[in-house]
Image (cartoon, grey):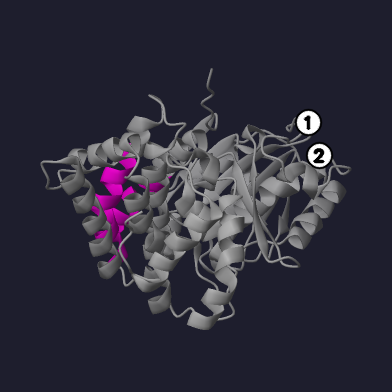
Amino acid sequence: MARFTLPRDVYHGKGCLEELKNLKGKKAILVVGGGSMKRQGFLDKAVNYLKEAGMEVEVFEGVEPDPSVETVMKGAEAMRKFEPDWIVSMGGGSPIDAAKAMWAFYEYPETTFEDLCIPFNFPELRQKAKFCAIPSTSGTATEVTAFSVITNYQTGVKYPLADFNITPDVAIVDPDLVEGLPAKQVAYTGMDALTHAIEAYVSTLNCSFTDPLALQAIEMVLDYLPASYNSNMAAREQMHYAQCLAGMAFSNALLGIVHSMAHKTGAAFSTGHIPHGCANAIYLPYVIKYNAKDPVAAKRYAEIARRMGLEGTSEKSLINSLCAKIDDFNVKLNIPKTLKEFGINEEEFKEKIAGIAERAVGDACTGSNPREIDPATMEKLFTCTYYGTEVDF
């Protein structure tokens, strides 16, 4: 038996933020990030719509990129004082992920972070509040997923939390919110969405329910991402929907080692943070070549290439075309091909990579990768992504 879970309602289309005025409740807390929603006027709009719904509204601001355990605890404390029956989160993946974790601590103050780190171990939510998510980037799809990523800055480790309980009740996918996205963010979040869809399609947990969503998302990203990057607003709208479809696929089929690698290298080097979508974009072609040594995965990568109309008559040539297409996108989007090109110091890389490889193998996303991997092989794969060498093992 398998399970397929989505939000009960997904509102999409320009201006659908207005749906907030149809939520039924007494009190709403609105969780937001660093200020872009405020500057663009969307925060005021959201507050006013919630007030039109007859609710008392409190705003929790300032969730940082890669939200911390401390921010989560602070937000949960604010919720316990205010006692909302709706938690509404608006912004990129960070405020929405943070609000999902706050929700658990609001409803269960005695639960521990360690408890929540065990996959699918959340207590039964919706005892006090329902959850509405409104994305302002086109990548993470956290508005439709059962996941949240929280960072412990004491240990420098990102924890992916996973439980169907934290799939939002309502997702509002309004393309108006992404019109002001900087080009770099369009590139990184777009490649994150592509990675979600490709990894979901080849995951060991893919199924008839997730496959069509993954393929449609891949096709839309390939059709619309370059134009979206170049500020075409019609394309940007389609990218906002594509990333949501990719999220529906991976929330139910799970991911693979591209994400394991990105999770464990994002905050690992002193030369600076590697943005999540950028890391995924760098690792994706190397991982495809590694996974394609597995015959089942090879067949599915070839299916993707065939469905996208890429050149090739054999499985191998189709997979090479898929990797070449991703390389071509990375060039168009100004994403480096290697970790070295990104600027990671070689000595530091050599010094840390064994530990990083071990942690990546232990990441929650490794279990559904189509080909098994051990720490020594993971280290070899990371080394290929550093120098840009061929994956031939």
- Quarter of the image holding residue 305? top left
Whichever of labels 1 and 2 marks the residue nearer the N terminus, that label is 2
- Quarter of the image holding residue 333? bottom left
Residue found at x 41% / y 25%: 209
The stretch of residues the image draws in magenta is 215-243
- The disc labelled 1 sits on which kind of residue? Gln
Mark 2: which secondary structure? helix
- At which x and y percent is residue 391? 33, 58
Mark 2, other Cα within 10 Å: few <14 / some 14–19 / many ≥20: many
Residue found at x 54% / y 17%: 1
Residue 13 is at least partly visible in this image: no
**In this orientation, which residue lies closer to the viewer: 275 or 287?**
287
**In this orientation, which residue lies closer to the viewer: 89 or 373?**
373
Mark 1, other Cα within 10 Å: few <14 / some 14–19 / many ≥20: few
Residue 71 is labelled as none
The residue singled out by tag 1 in the image is 127
The residue singled out by tag 2 in the image is 107
- At which x and y percent is residue 131? 65, 39
Mark 1: which secondary structure? loop
- At which x and y percent is residue 19? 52, 40
